[in-house]
C-alpha cells in the first residue's frame, strides 16, 4: 500500500479549472500596491500572458501536495515565479 501511495503522490498533477486572461489578472492586482504584485505584473507583461505562470505554479505546487497548499504557499510560489 505504501508503494502505491508514494507512486500516486509522485505522479499526481495539478491543473486549474477554467481560463484566466492577462486582463483578469491585471484587474485583480490593480489595487494591490505590493512589490510582489508589481513584480508579477511585470513578469506577465514580459511573458505576454498567464499560461507560463499557470504551468510553473502547478508544477511547483506539486511539491506541497503532501504538506498542504494554502494561500501563503501560493503567494510564495507566485513571488518566486515573478523573480525568476
Image: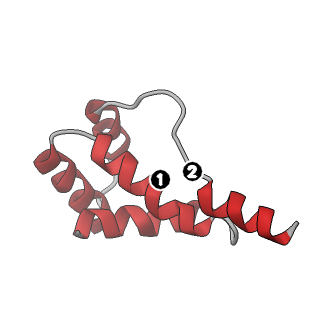
Figure disc tally: 2
Q: Position of residue 16 (x, y in %)?
A: 51, 39
Determine the image quadrant of residue 65: bottom right
Left or right of residue 40: residue 13 = right
Query: Residue 4, which numbered label?
Result: none
Residue at the outermost left position: 46
Residue 79 at least partly seen: yes
Residue bearing the label numbered 1: 58
Left or right of residue 81: residue 65 = right
> Foreground: 3 or 45?
3
Q: Residue at x 31, y 63 (%)?
A: 81
Q: Quadrant of the N terminus?
A: bottom right
Q: Residue at x 79, y 62 (%)?
A: 4
Residue bearing the label numbered 2: 13
Determine the image quadrant of residue 78: bottom left
Q: Position of residue 52 (x, y in %)?
A: 29, 47
Residue 30 at least partly seen: no
Please, what secondary structure does the residue beneath circle 2 have? loop
> Foreground: 25 or 33?
25
Q: Position of residue 6 (x, y in %)?
A: 72, 68
Q: Residue at x 26, y 63 (%)?
A: 82
Vertical position of residue 60 compared to residue 19: above or below = below
Sequence order check: which comes first, mark 2 or mark 1?
2
Q: CA gap, disc 2 to disc 1?
A: 7 Å
Please, what secondary structure does the residue beneath circle 1 have? helix
> Foreground: 15 or 72?
15
Q: Position of residue 24 (x, y in %)?
A: 34, 32
Q: Are marks 2 and 1 in contact (CB under 8 Å)?
A: yes
Amino acid at each position: 500500500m505504501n508503494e502505491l501511495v508514494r507512486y500516486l503522490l509522485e505522479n499526481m498533477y495539478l491543473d486549474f479549472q477554467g481560463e484566466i486572461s492577462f486582463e483578469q489578472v491585471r484587474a485583480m492586482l490593480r489595487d494591490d500596491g505590493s512589490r510582489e504584485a508589481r513584480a508579477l505584473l511585470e513578469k506577465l507583461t514580459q511573458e505576454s500572458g498567464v499560461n507560463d505562470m499557470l504551468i510553473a505554479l502547478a508544477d511547483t505546487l506539486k511539491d506541497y501536495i503532501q504538506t498542504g497548499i494554502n494561500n501563503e504557499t501560493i503567494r510564495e510560489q507566485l513571488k518566486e515565479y515573478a523573480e525568476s
